[in-house]
Image (spheres, grey):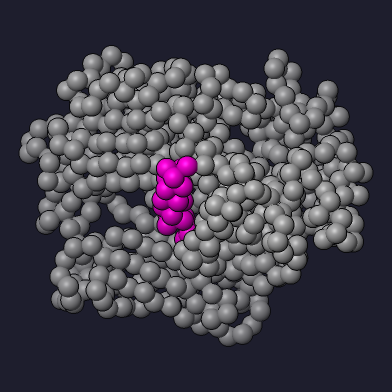
Amino acid sequence: MYDTSFDTSEHSGHAYPDPQMQRQEWVSLNGPWDFCIDRDARFGLPKEVTWDRTITVPFSPETPASGIHDTGLYAAVWYRRTMESPALIDGQRLLLHFEAVDYRTTVWVNGARVATHEGGYTPFHADITDVLLPGEPQEITVRAEDDPADLAKPRGKQDWKLDSHSIWYPRTTGIWQTVWLEVVPGTRIRTLEWSSSLDRWDIRLSASIKGGPTSGLQLHVQLKVGETLLANDTYEVLAGEVHRHIALSDPGIDDYRNGLLWSPSSPTIIDARLELRDAQGTLIDKVSSYTAIRSVAVQGDRFILNGRPLNLRMVLDQGYWPESGLTAPNDDALLQDVLLAKKMGFNGVRKHQKIESRRYLYWADRLGLLVWEEMPSAYRYTTASIERTTREWMEVIHRDRSHHCIVAWVPFNESWGVPDLPESPAQRHYVQTLYHLTKALDPTRPVIGNDGWESVATDIIGIHDYDDNPQRIGKRYGIDDIEAHLLKRERPGGRMLFVEGERIWSHPIMLTEFGGIAYSGRDGAWGYSRSETAEQLLERYKALLETVRNLPALAGFCYTQFTDTYQEANGLLYADRTPKISFEDLSLATTGAVPDFDTLAETIWREHIMRR
């Protein structure tokens, strides 16, 4: 019953959903489920529901890929399916995982409520072992409540109007990422987190253990790069936890050190194998994982990777697909998006208003693509929006802080959810609180408190400026006196760049949204400016990028945007990922150098296709 092969030909999810904590016994539950739209959220229990159609999970009912394609306004949806339970032995447990369900979820198994969760972008699971019916099919029922008009919950780019308008897109209701089962031991590794230090030349491991005896447990950890063994250690489990700095051998030779460092040009992965054993040495649980050695920081006006300045060349990525919305069609599509960003000459992406699948972060880790992770916005400032956003943002950080591709956290964008930031001390305190909370949960990465303008707490000054004139851009950001002329006088988007009294102008400055040049033959498509031909798009892109690349005041940039997204036609690629300009021309314009798409990425792609 359990499929552990790498098969992504039908639905996203046939690759292990949590790549940093892999076990052998699991199965995807993606595919057909019974379905019901509960427009007014009238039903409270499964027995009240009339199942009148079938949906393809994990695609949201708004999308064609789901088989429903209902883009109307409705407050709740219901799902049901049956499945065969595996035979559990030696105290094994069966976990039911949901990678993401939008927004408030209740789960029943065989009529018993087993889980509730609030938040549309983070995973949750339930141990369903004790409600299984021996020898019978097991029934799973899911209710997802998602008020389309609620602006006080994190919703990102999901429109609250019936039809998409301006920069907002169709809603995503209910299950939109993988659902899966996992067989685990009763005593097991429950959580696993990694970080690294170049100064100490070590890997930090934090693991928690669930169940089992209170003493005598040991965690064995093996770290390897290829066939080279870096560590082979055993640690006592104390109070159900293991926290260790794993020192690596450092001969002090730069070539050796640099060969182990992770970067976009050399994404070295350290494979990890963890085994949990009891006092007699009996194997209880085993997990495959991975980590890397790299550091990120800001120093003066520069972004620093592995102790050296790196100019960030990023592209804004909304993470939508024409037929499947926020959900990738399959794992290949996530891999392809990482490859395409690199092929266009970018070394990073700003994932905009979306918490992307862990599989995307896995491929970014493997191929060497930097990621800025941004919290989807709420659009009202209320006590509820504060509590909801803070809680879910903490879940996001806990989920993703072991992914070394992530090099910055962005809790707010363009003052969305804090509309009166300059005038409201309370709203400024809110932004400052999430900035400092993020730094407390993860002190290893820069935090951009409010990207775009009106900074009140940040490590990088992110500016959004859609002026399409390269000469004006060059003049605005090429001046010597940044403090007096740019940060105090200029107001891109009509907004002040920082709130008075906040001395942040010594930080790195980046254009984190600019460009937005549209080219499309579709009616109603728009961008911040427009080109009539592909040749004109290339000419304007080259002129703008050449200007921005050569401004010494900037530590990097993020171009808008990766692909066309619904009514927005300002992508470098069409929505189906077809390039509007040749990849060679795009890469040359982005980097200013002869295109040299790294062979590692091409090799990984070829190996992946061969495995399939």
- In x, y percent, where is residue 230? 46, 75
- In x, y percent, where is residue 442? 50, 64
Instruction: Please indicate, yes or no, whether residue 364 appears anywhere in the rendered image.
Output: no
Which residue does the image show at 31% across and 36% down from the upper left? 105
Residue 281 figure quarter: bottom left
Which residue does the image show at 50% across and 44% down from the upper left? 355
- 70 vs 317: above or below: above
Instruction: Please indicate, yes or no, whether residue 282 appears anywhere in the rendered image.
Output: yes
Magenta stretch, main secondary structure class: helix
Q: How many marks?
A: 0
Residue 224 figure quarter: bottom left
Point out the stretch of residues depicted in magenta: 382-409
- 220 vs 534: above or below: below
Q: Is residue 491 left or right of residue 185?
A: right
Q: Is residue 452 left or right of residue 446?
A: right
Residue 339 figure quarter: top right
Which residue does the image show at 31% across and 15% down from the upper left? 53
Is residue 546 or residue 267 the one in the foreground? 546
Residue 390 in magenta?
Answer: yes
Is residue 520 or residue 48 the one in the foreground? 48
Which residue does the image show at 70% across and 48% down from the upper left? 453
